[in-house]
Image: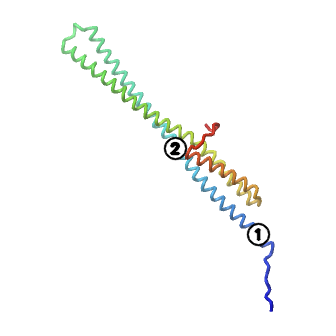
Amino acid sequence: MAEEIELPDPKELEEKKEKRFDRRIALVTAIYAVVLAITSLGGNNATKEMLLSQQQASDQWAFYQAKGIKQHISENTAALFEATLFDRGGSISSGAKARYEELAKSLKKDAARYNDEKKEIEKEAKKLEEERDTYRAKNPYFEYGEVLLQIAIVLSSISILADSPPVFSVSVVSALMGALLSLNGYLLIFRIPFLH
């Protein structure tokens, strides 16, 4: 006796095919979400580092200003001692004259030291400003990358609901662009003029 072979129902095959399409999109959407999380982390870190560098640069410039004030006070006080010596030269005792000269010399040394210290502080402040500017340049790439990845997630969800492979294709393009911008946020490989 011949065995009967049961052929699958075409409707069941179509449902399995649709479920497979839905599962693949769901998996890709999960990958989008992971890339979005990495992009968001990069953006948050860039913002944090930008603000920290700005704060540190501001601190350095305040320190620079304080050194400048000390330098000017030392220079002005030394000039005052020298003017006093010039004006009262003969009427001042030799001990007082020596003390004024010693103080003026010491203050001039201090002023020169403050000037040298200012140069080092200025270098550090400018370095911190460069770091700030680098993080400021990175930040828009993360922001636009996040937006494109969020759009990709929404579009892939719509493609499942609408059973539309073309919408899913658009989501892939959006996700790739978002991932590229995110990567550029980390590496600054290229610069897009309108983002700066």
Please rate how many residues cluster around mark 2, counting C-alpha atoms within 10 Å: few if below 14, some from 14 to 19, many from 20.
some
* Comparing labels 2 and 1, the label whose residue is closer to the camera: 1
Residue 48: image x %, image y %?
Answer: 51, 44
Disc sitting over residue 48 in the figure: 2
**CB under 8 Å between discs 2 and 1:** no
Q: Is residue 93 left or right of 27 when viewed as pictured?
A: left
Residue at 45% x, 37% y: name it: 56
Residue 8: image x %, image y %?
Answer: 78, 77
Element assignment for label 1: helix
Residue 68: image x %, image y %?
Answer: 39, 25
Q: Which residue is mark 1?
A: 15
Residue at 66% x, 58% y: name it: 29
Q: Is residue 5 left or right of 187 when viewed as pictured?
A: right
In the depicted structure, whether residue 54 falls above or below residue 16: above
Name the amino acid, label 1: Glu
Q: Quadrant of the C terminus?
A: top right
